[in-house]
Image (cartoon, rainbow, N blue to C red):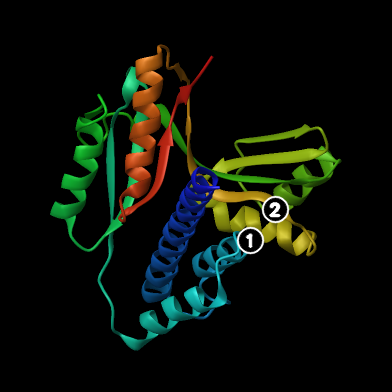
Amino acid sequence: MGRHYENRKADMAKTQGAKAKLYSRYGKEIYVCAKNGGAELDSNLSLRRMIEKAKKEQVPAHVIDNALKKATSGAGEDFSPARYEGFGPGGCMVIVDCLTDNNNRTFTDVRQCFVKNDAKIGTQGTVAHMFDHQAIFVFTHDDEEAILEILMEADADVTDLELEDGMITVLAPHTEYNKVRTALVDAMPEIDFEMDEITFLPQNHTTVVGEENIENFDNFMAALDDCDDVQNVYHNAEFD
């Protein structure tokens, strides 16, 4: 029982750690959205989107409420976005997005993740030009033409629209996120998005080969995930 119990305890600790990280990330993003754009959901679409995403990922109500209270009270930290780019293990390209109240600390923490895992941090613009900054929506639907008509009537700029296995994927420039989402929700109030976010999509992929590179890549991702200031990581790595 001893070994099984220790393994179970380790799994539980890992799960709790992942939940704490998730709650912290959403709490910070909700706080920043509310502080920058106000706490009214009707007028702050970014905040509404973030709260909807948090609820989908089962972030507790008290985490959301505390972030909103902190933002409206005038207390709390001043967070600013920071983005770092470089090459990960095996030559893949990586973008790391952070929210920080101390740029020097965050840069040092992120740089150590690169240095310790055979990766190389670069300057701004090193790899971002090889990614498309896109809004992406994925939802269940079987009529591609109907969705296209909805978006055309809303004068929404769409990069791509695809129907596959009963799922529609809409890609649009990140600046069109609110217009596309509003058009879809207004036309289909019951819509349930499988994916609904702004992301960086790689223009091509790099296959990471070799056990050492793959292990370094896994360790690199884990190290970034452990950084409190890291919000999102985008890469173009793929594996055979």
- Above or below: residue 62 compared with residue 59: below
Does the image show residue 96? no
Q: Specify the quadrant of the image occupied by residue 75.
A: bottom left
Give the secondary structure at mark 2.
strand
Residue beneath the point at 45% across and 24% down: 237
Does the image show residue 177? yes
- Above or below: residue 88 compared with residue 147: above
Q: Nearer the viewer, residue 100 or 89?
A: 89
Farthest residue in the bottom direction? 73
Dot 1 or dot 2: first in sequence order is 1
Q: Nearer the viewer, residue 187 or 122?
A: 122
Residue neighbourhood size for the residue with mark 1, other residues' Cα within 10 Å, grouped as few (<14), some (14–19), many (≥20): few
Residue beneath the point at 47% across and 48% down: 6
Disc sitting over residue 193 in the figure: 2
Residue beneath the point at 56% across and 47% down: 1
Structural distance between the alpha carbons of marks 1 and 2: 10 Å
Residue beneath the point at 21% across and 51% down: 106
Observer-side mark, 1 or 2, equals 1
Q: Is residue 28 left or right of residue 53?
A: left
Residue on which the image places disc 1: 56
Residue neighbourhood size for the residue with mark 2, other residues' Cα within 10 Å, grouped as few (<14), some (14–19), many (≥20): some
Q: Is residue 13 left or right of residue 90?
A: right
- Above or below: residue 196 compared with residue 124: below
Give the secondary structure at mark 1.
helix
Residue 82: percent from the left, percent from the top?
27, 51
Residue 165: percent from the left, percent from the top?
81, 33
Q: Quadrant of the C terminus?
A: top right
Farthest residue in the left direction? 104
